[in-house]
Amino acid sequence: MTDLRVFPDTGVLVAMIMFPRDRHGQVSLAGEVLQLYDEGAFDLLLSRVVVDELDEVVDRDFLEHRHHLLAFLAPFEDQLLRWPTPEEIQAVLPVVVDADDAPIFAAALVAGLDIVLSNDFQTFHTPQAKAFWKQHGMKVESLYGLLCVFGLRERKGELPST
Amino acid sequence: MTIAINNIRRITLRVPSQLHRALTQAAAERDVSLNRLAVEALELYAVQQKRRFPLKELSAILAPAAQTKGLTEEEMMRHIKEVRRRIWQERYRETVEASRKAEPA
């Protein structure tokens, strides 16, 4: 399943990069997903909206390492998804809880993706948001949910497939 | 990033003197060894060849930094929300509202 296109929100991207292990040193869910990506299990679609936020967060908390982020991402400029237009952002405003999440929703919409990956349940997993993703041929998964997609976890409340 | 000595391999490069001078100068400006600079350049090349976002390589740098700073995932998620709000206000809000007003009634 190497052509599965996954769009991470900034939260899971930060979790994958900065918290691949939990406080006890065990591989976290984000770490498992990072490993899957590194093995080529799926494609990541990175939006400029998400990269902007990542850059701001690194600039704020890891200023001394920002040059690494910029140097590592520079060769991939052509792979980053474009910023959504004001009209595209405006179109998703009725779906979002907070207006400031609208650029991320709009960026996901222009990406042509399979899965929105987010652990922000109050924003990306609301019934309204889920209906929106479904309407546009996508679905939203958490880090745990993505591991379920690859058969590495079982959906809670589901019987294991035989 | 610590790499065990037995995981180190040596390569010898022959480079034009002009390139050597430029690399030496760049290393001095960044206060790193010429070896460190060359390793970083080669890592970057390897990443580019993979054409996959170098998240694992970034993680090797930023995860220890987050640990050293004692940052938790919850704090980082809060920072993201704050950054998102500021970006919305500074970059998007005005143009999105303008596009809404420009729509025919």
Image (cartoon, coloured by chain):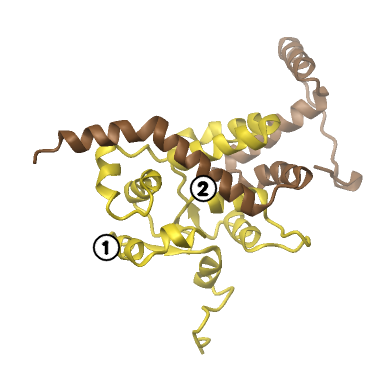
Chain colours: A yellow, B brown
Q: Which residue is mark 2?
A: A10
Quadrant placement of the N terminus of chain B: top right
Residue B12: percent from left, percent from top = 82, 28
Q: Quadrant of residue B104?
A: top left
Relative image position of residue A40 (x, y in whole percent)? 56, 56
Q: Amino acid at mark 2?
A: Thr
The residue under the point 57% across, 48% down is B78
Q: Which of the numbered marks, if any, corresponds to residue A135?
A: 1
* Disc 2 to disc 1: CB gap under 8 Å: no
**Quadrant housing the C terminus of chain B:** top left
- Percent position (x, y) of residue B83? 51, 39
How much space separates mark 2 and mark 1, taking CA atoms?
A: 23 Å
Amino acid carrying mark 1 in the image: Gln
Q: Nearer the viewer, residue B1 or B81?
A: B81
Name the chain under label 1: A
Which mark is first along the chain, 1 or 2? 2
Q: In the drawing, does residue B31 fall left or right of residue A80?
A: right
What SS does tag 1 mark? helix
Residue A112 seen in the current view:
yes
The secondary element bearing badge 2 is classed as helix
With respect to residue A146, does B98 lie above or below? above
**Residue depicted at x 16% and y 33%:** B102
Residue at the right extreme?
Answer: B5
